[in-house]
Image (spheres, rainbow, N blue to C red):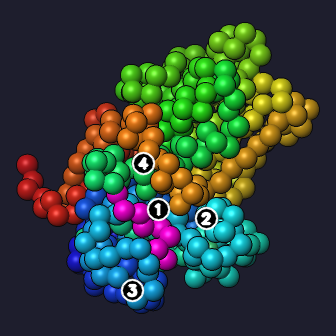
């Protein structure tokens, strides 16, 4: 089959690799019909997540059709149209039973590797480095789905592919960001990052009763989308002093909830830019935490900081004094998609969540390197490129 493979930093190629097969009776094989790019892929492509190997197939946000199924998978059959959650959970361990699927004890075959860094292993994730299980990703014609009974969900007929694909990762991540922010009716919420995850966090925050959501980014087309489709007020951090602006729009109090939907590759201006870049280059910190610092600083006393932007390792100059003395709560995590999928179908159906505008670039797999270039550099008004593996490349 064809697959989009990682071969080094910013080096992607479509290659022919063997088709996946059932290796465990709990597996299913899915023919991928749509597979989206995600901000998390950028951390792999830009070389910030360790343990990638040449030839690794990336991609984790996808839908498809079941073409083969293991003997022990209940409730699914060949021919089912399914969305598969990007995080893999066994469904049986303590953490899966508590609905904290991204903490699964059993789905990461490279648990030993991860224990060396995180002390305890976390769940495997499709196409997301050997540290997270070494599973082949979804930017391919077919994919092996372990523990399919728990991770693959039949898509209701009235939900189109163009919405269902984001139920795999982008929507549950935004939804969990809002949930972890403990939004109460009337709250003011600030969301850093107006990418797919930030947009879904904004829509979810309104769904949970936020009175006002303020989106922060520097790309006007993304801010315009946040205003038009997600109904946020918007701030461009290149044109505005964010801390001052947030004070002003909250009566001097600060937002009740601050959501980091940016993560380890935050872009910064001024001295902070040189500080973070050089520390990262010298490997004195692995991630650039500019948004985390700003969220902790901006948040009102007693408020909540919710972190879904991905961090991989160590960060520097986190204002712990502010965190403690302002009595903040901070929560974070890879999302627990399996816990949210059924209610997300409902929210899509009743129009409370609408991700359709995220799909700006339907493409063939052969266009993969180009797709990631425009997504990484935020060119051509790209929100998310979505690969349709059956679509062959016709060229210019
Ligand atoms: P994206 O690249 O489309 O969007 C990120 C946005 O952040 C960009 O628009 C960028 O301009 C903006 N940004 C950069 N620096 C900023 C700053 N200083 N202030 C405000 N905005 C800034 O990515 P995405 O797909 O929306 O993903 C966002 C984050 O969520 C990534 O870190 C990704 O890894 C993470 N993610 C986490 C999970 C999870 O389970 N926790 C799942 C999916 C994605
Ligand atoms: Zn588990």
Closer to the camera in the image, 151 or 371: 151
- Closer to the observer: label 4 or label 2? 4
For label 4, being within 8 Å of ligand 1 is answered no
Farthest residue toward the right? 325
Residue located beneath label 4 in the image: 345
Mark 1 touching mark 2, by CB under 8 A?
Answer: yes
Mark 3 or 1: in front is 3
Where is mark 2, residue-wise? 101
Badge number at residue 70: 3
Question: Mark 1 against mark 4, which lies toward the viewer?
Answer: 4
Determine which quarter of the picture holds residue 6: bottom left
Which residue is pictured at 61% across the width and 20% down the height? 211
Please report contact status of discs 3 and 1: CB closer than 8 Å, yes or no. Answer: no
Instruction: Tell whether circle 2 marks a residue whose Cβ is less than 8 angstroms from ligand 2.
Output: yes
Per the image, label 1 sits on a secondary structure element best described as loop
Say whether disc 1 or disc 4 marks the residue closer to the N-terminus: 1
């Amino acid at each position: 089959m064809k697959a989009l493979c990682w071969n080094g930093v910013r080096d992607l190629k479509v290659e022919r690799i063997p088709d996946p097969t059932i290796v465990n009776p709990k597996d299913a094989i899915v023919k991928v019909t749509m597979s989206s790019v995600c901000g998390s892929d950028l951390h792999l492509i830009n070389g910030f997540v360790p343990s990638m190997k040449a030839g690794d197939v990336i991609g984790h946000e996808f839908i498809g059709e079941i073409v083969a199924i293991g003997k022990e998978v209940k409730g699914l059959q060949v021919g089912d149209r399914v969305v598969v959650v990007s995080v893999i959970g066994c469904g049986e361990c303590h953490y899966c039973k508590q609905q904290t699927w991204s903490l699964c004890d059993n789905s990461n075959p490279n648990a030993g590797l991860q224990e060396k860094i995180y002390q305890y292993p976390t769940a495997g994730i499709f196409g997301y480095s050997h540290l997270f299980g070494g599973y082949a990703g979804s930017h391919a014609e077919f994919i092996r789905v372990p523990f399919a009974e728990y991770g693959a969900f039949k898509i209701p007929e009235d939900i189109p592919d163009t919405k269902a694909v984001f139920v795999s990762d982008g929507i549950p991540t935004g939804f969990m960001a809002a949930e972890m922010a403990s939004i109460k009716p009337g709250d003011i919420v600030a969301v850093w990052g107006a990418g797919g995850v930030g947009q879904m966090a904004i829509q979810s925050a309104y769904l949970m009763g936020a009175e006002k959501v303020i989106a922060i980014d520097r790309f006007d087309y993304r801010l315009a989308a946040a205003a038009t489709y997600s109904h946020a007020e918007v701030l461009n951090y290149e044109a505005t002093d964010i801390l001052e602006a947030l004070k002003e729009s909250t009566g001097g109090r600060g937002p009740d909830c601050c959501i980091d939907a940016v993560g380890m590759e935050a872009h910064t201006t001024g001295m902070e830019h040189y500080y973070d870049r050089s520390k990262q280059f010298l490997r004195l910190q692995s991630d650039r935490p500019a948004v985390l610092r700003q969220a902790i600083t901006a948040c009102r006393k007693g408020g909540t900081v919710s972190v879904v932007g991905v961090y991989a390792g160590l960060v520097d100059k986190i204002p712990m004094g502010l965190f403690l003395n302002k009595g903040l709560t901070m929560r974070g995590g890879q999302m627990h998609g399996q816990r949210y999928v059924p209610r997300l179908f409902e929210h899509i159906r009743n129009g409370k969540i609408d991700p359709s505008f995220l799909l700006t670039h339907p493409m063939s797999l052969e266009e993969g390197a180009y797709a990631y270039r425009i997504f990484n550099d935020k060119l051509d008004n790209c929100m998310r490129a979505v690969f349709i593996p059956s679509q062959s490349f016709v060229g210019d």
